[in-house]
Amino acid sequence: MATVYIDNKPYEMDPEQNLLHGCVSQGLNLPYFCWHPALGSVGACRQCAVKQFKDEHDTHGKIVMSCMTPAAEGTRISIADPEVTAFRAGITEGLMLNHPHDCPVCDEGGECHLQDMTVMTGHDYRRYEFDKRTFRNQDLGPLVNHEANRCIQCYRCVRYYRDYAGGRDLNAFASRNTVFFGRNEDGVLENEFSGNLVEICPTGVFTDKTLKHHYSRKWDQQFAPSVCVHCALGCNIDAGERYGTLRRVVNRYNHEVNGYFLCDRGRFGYEFVNSERRLRQPLLNGKPTSSAEARRHLDERAAGGRVIGIGSPRASLESNFALRTLVGPEHFYSGMADDQAKLSTRMIEILRRGPMRTPTLREIEECDAVFILGEDLTSVAPRMALSLRQSVRQPMEIARRANIPLWMDHGVRDALQDSKGPLYVATPYATRLDEVATATFRGAPDDLARLGFAVAHALDPEAPTAQDFPLAAEIANALKTAKRPLLISGMSCGSEAVMEAAANVAMAAHAALSLTAPECNTVGAALIGGSPLTAAFEAVKNGRADTAIILENDLYRRAPAAEVDAFLGAAKHVIVLDHLANATTQKAELELPAGTFAESDGTFISSEGRAQRFFQVFAPQNEVLSSWRWLKPDTWQNLDDVLAALSKALPDLAPASYAAPSAAFRIAGAKIPRSPHRESGRTAVLVNINISEQKTPEDPDSALSFSMEGTPDKPPAALIPFFWSPGWNSIQAVNTYQKEPGGPVRGGDAGVRMFEPAAPNGHSSDRQAWFSAIPPAFEPREGEWLLLPMYDFIGSEELSQAARGLAELAAKPYVAVNCSDLAEGAEVEVSCASGTFRLPIRLRPDLPRGVACLSAGIAPLSGVTMPAWGKIERAK
Amino acid sequence: MTSSTEKPLTGNVRPDGSVLDLPAYEQTGGYRAIRKVLNGGMPPKTVIAEVKDANLRGRGGAGFPTGMKWSFVPVGKDTPNPTYLVINGDEMEPGTFKDRFLLERNPHQLIEGAILAGFAIEADIAYIFLRGEYTLAAKRLERAIAEAYERHYLGKDILGSGYSLELHLHLSGGRYICGDETGLLNALEGKRANPRAKPPFPVVVGLFGKPTVVNNVETISNVPHIINNGAEWFHGLSRTKDGGTKLYGVSGKVKRPGLWELPMGTTVRELLEEHAGGMRDGLKFRGLLPGGSSTPFIVEEHLDTHMDFTEMPKAGSRLGTGTMIVLDDHTCPVGMAWNMTKFFARESCGFCTPCWSGLGWAERILRSIEDGHGKPDDLDKLASQTRMWSPGNTFCALAPGAADPLETAMKYFRADFERHIDEHRCPWR
Amino acid sequence: MLTAEEIQEIEREAAHYPKREAVSIDALKIVQKHRGWVSDESLRDIAEHIGMSRTDLDSIATFYNLIYRRPVGRHVISVCDSVSCWIMGCEQMRKHLQQRLGIGLGETTPDNRFTLLPTVCLGCCDHAPALMVDGNLHADLDPRKIDTELENYK
């Protein structure tokens, strides 16, 4: 640590960092705009100026930018010096020259970094008397709003969008005081992480367009810490509501998982909670009924004796466990299709037995050689793709040799130029990450697996192989010479062999291993167990059961329609709990409205193996309840009771109880308020129903309260509903919750890792047995195609399909082929075991011969079992 | 070399304005220096030492010692390659017109200088970054480069020495900030010409991330003569500590605006009165900017200052490019300050706040004063703006360069500013 | 569509750089030389040829004074308005031109013959006031002289 003197007081700072980072770490109020902990320093805005002195005798000093100055031992600066204080106020004055001063009508108002910094510098009087430059705003799509006049030319947006996220359709135009940040023409922002612009932009230029449809100020919203449900990575979020409507989702900083950024599916998928398709009250034979009546009916059916329960990989641990308890473990089915069940079981097995360790998303940013086997990460695990875009910037040695501190962003980029760390992408089709890859390999899953086995063999001759590949030696060499190599694979190809091959490579390379999963609680559901779907179908078909309770699971997405029709037709009683009306709920005798993440509490286990708790944002005014509350026995009163029972019945899952403090947790005897102090009209919210102030809803399930009353202190990471500190009203307030910007949350980040390897990596004696089931090479078939899923970032995932804004951008169903005698968009008929479908062609010359892809998860293809052989013929 | 010994840069040019082609240049003694140096004549370190001893200082405006800059380039087997030499021909400083002369009349002098400089820093590739408006220079340089390649003075294995240098001509897209060393590098890389932060310095991380030296046209043009005649000779040309001659220019309402190669350290008075003939009849001298727009005004009392890098600061100014802009008593100083501020505001790249925001504001205030709408506190606002533009407060030297003329205009011609404000008009209109 | 000639010229320049994107400004100027200005279609074609996004290329194009992203007439008159020309009377020059041509700065004559633009210091301050028409420098100007010289530009 270095000693830095600030206004003659000594402070300990990290000498590898710059002075601004150090000052913010110390809680000193130094204003800034263009610097960001994840983006480094460029020295553009000049807001962070301090005065630097040569030594104690130097009384003159000179103004320097703290973000561009290393926190070297013995540095002497002043923040309070009058000249530099006036300079900082002058900078704010300069930034505000052309600003519309439209805070009252600006969405950013109340959580605006520009407001905060203006107050901090003390600039409060407008001397500029001339015209302001104005811009025409652009329509950037349904997710991000553009209001360019508010721009302060800090360049954060383009640095994030282009340099960090790899986007190509946002840039700075023109120059001097008329720089315009936007696209060359109106159009939807193409990058999958464009939504982070709303938090990166320190003013109201880029704001959440979905929020505009139901706008509410930050101080008027009620918040809760939650977890994203739109993939298996488990990014942490804070959800905000008002008047019982979910308004928006913001990033909840988790140093190990999502850091400062979300993907657009995670940020804007929340709109499904407000969808017209929501089940908001129980329906008995299609007619609304009271909760009491619904419960009575449920209890009756459950006691009927021949009941099965079908759980879900997108339902919480608690809900799945409650159903399992209700019907009994022998009658509980995981709700996963057979292949998914097999794959997830294999995944758990691999993660459990080790010795490979699963890295966190943050650790992935530091991996210096990566081999992706079979995964289209940008669509399936988007936030991981963003981490990989940082990991390929590994040749930091080049910067170190030139003595460039790693936070000096442009200097590092100029030094590194285009050099990238090795990234190899082996998938059936071209992915977005190909553009930063060293080399790519296209093949059917069996060939991908064979490549993997070959790479493992190249690393360790004892590992089995069946075929050599020219690329295998290169990949093996890259992994071997790396200090932190990484293998990424998963369930997307539908192939156990692919995952096993990846496991072999990871073992041979002493590398870390990340496996993706499709849904937010695939791993949790796999750990709870239960037989797969066809077993459930069999049970009813064979008459062993006649009643099915289906938890948060649209079976038409799991199996071919004909099979599901048969099952639901054969069952005498079908009870469904879910959020949205869907094909399965339509067939139900009793539909129970299940709380979404916004209206319930529970735990998911991510593909990293991290158990994380999500908390209810609001107590719904209607009959919606957490699924586990519909299903639980009376002996369980609250969430802690459920978790206690779960831990007892399934001890392997016990650590999940520690994902967050229990409901008994208090800070100095007080609960943690969901609402900020200034929430307006909080006592009058329901005055149209009852003029008397309603009793604040109780929350027996968490240490949070549905109120603004509670502790003013900062809660532990798992319980942070919003980031706010005196003088820091914007999302930059995250600084005040971290030990240092860009570092862990004070007190530790949220979540509990369930898998840590049994033996440490690096010792061959600790290696587990090689997987050796190598599939034969893929043989294309005459007149047929191997059908594989092609994942779309927006469209394939179930719940976000019902999000209004995202739905505008969602892909329509298609079949992708590499075929020269059919035109793009031509209609064809695809027939396979799951059915016959009329679809338009998408020409994809990147696909290997004999392989075609169907858009995954998009009706009518949602339930198609793949891989499968099929025919493609011109439509009649 | 005969008559050119006192005027090495310009002594050999043709009075009719035509260009010296390669044979003509060789007749004046051209391409002797490369023969002297290559093939073991003078190893790179010796070339650097000679240029250092000569005390050649950068002629682009900053005056950094050239030999010293070259000595910072990492050389040897384990250093990143290629090494680049970039010649800054982006002459756009208002009032400056000296590099144009050298480029149009004697491009081979520059090319020979480039080969020598390239050899000294072990550069593999050199670029001449030429402003796009210098179309005649572009044509002549293209021709000259082709001639040099034909004679194997450029390209692989020059004169069988084993040293290779590729030289490319690049025409800029047109922005003043391209004349800034690191702005130029970004422009040459095909990007927006925002300057870069230093450190890292171009000698370490420069063009395309590789070690790079950027030198001005006039600077490089001196190198063949230093090599041919030695450091001491170069000292002998000058009147003061800084070595060599200087291309000095005068523009404005003088009798003979023009460009002259004179000993470094020639006084302002000599340049203004002897060579430029003094003010036109009926006009009185009020002040001048000694080295282009980005230098502070000097007035009557400073006329005996020697125009070099060391002496000029004593008059509160700088040598800059050495081309003077003269203000007469029939020209409005406020209008002149406004014109220059407008130039800087327009040419701001838009990266750092005090420049893109402050220059625009200052321009509006000056316009308002010039139009007769000035307010009493406008001068305070302008003064506080110029303080915002001090070196170090901004990202590069553009805004500090804008501060110099404006600050000193308000200092020396304050009464004129006040008159505009008090009388609600420009008295010169 | 870029013409074969444009492509050839661009590739000749591209060979001078180790990175393809470095030729962006050269490419814009080359296409502008052939077509007078850089339209959205031209921008699209150049971007595709180099392998850059349109947004990235336009970000560069709009930074530089000499790249025209709006149509210009057959001849572009660039009047220097920097300090030396200003002292020597560029204002009168500009006013004269505006009156003669009937257009303001940034505008094109109805017959598409001339576009009138301001430009920064042209580097011939001892022969001020000066202007350029297309690639040609005209200096030591007065209203009569410029009228005569403009006759050469049809």
Image (tube, coloured by chain):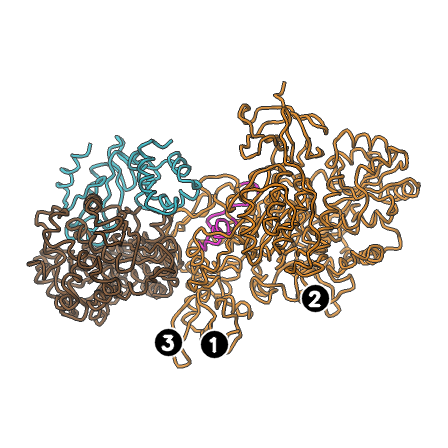
User: A450 or B180: which is nearer to us?
Assistant: A450
**Residue A318 percent across, percent down from the top left:** 79, 52
Identify the chain drawn in orange.
A
* Secondary-structure class at tag 1: loop
Left or right: B228 with respect to A304? Answer: left
Q: Residues within 10 Å of mark 1 (few under 14, many from 20)?
A: few
| Res. B429 in view | no
Residue that badge 1 annotates: A7
* Secondary-structure class at tag 2: loop
Identify the chain drawn in cyan.
C
Three-letter amino acid code at the position of disc 2: Thr
State the extent of the magenta-drawn residues as a range.
A141-165
Residue that badge 3 annotates: A60
Three-letter amino acid code at the position of disc 1: Asp
**Residue B127 percent across, percent down from the top left:** 28, 51
Who comes first in sequence, dot 2 or dot 1? 1
> Does the magenta segment cover residue A153?
yes
Mark identifier at residue C152: none
Q: Colour of chain B?
A: brown
Residue that badge 2 annotates: A711
Whole-number angstrom distance, CA of label 3 to CA of label 1? 13 Å
Compared with A38, A146 (above or below) is: above
Are both tags, 2 and 1, on one chain? yes
**Residue C17 percent across, percent down from the top left:** 35, 47
* Secondary-structure class at tag 3: loop
Mark 3 or 2: the one toward you: 3
Q: Which image quadrant for residue B300?
A: bottom left
Who comes first in sequence, dot 3 or dot 2? 3
Point out the residue furthest to the top here.
A876
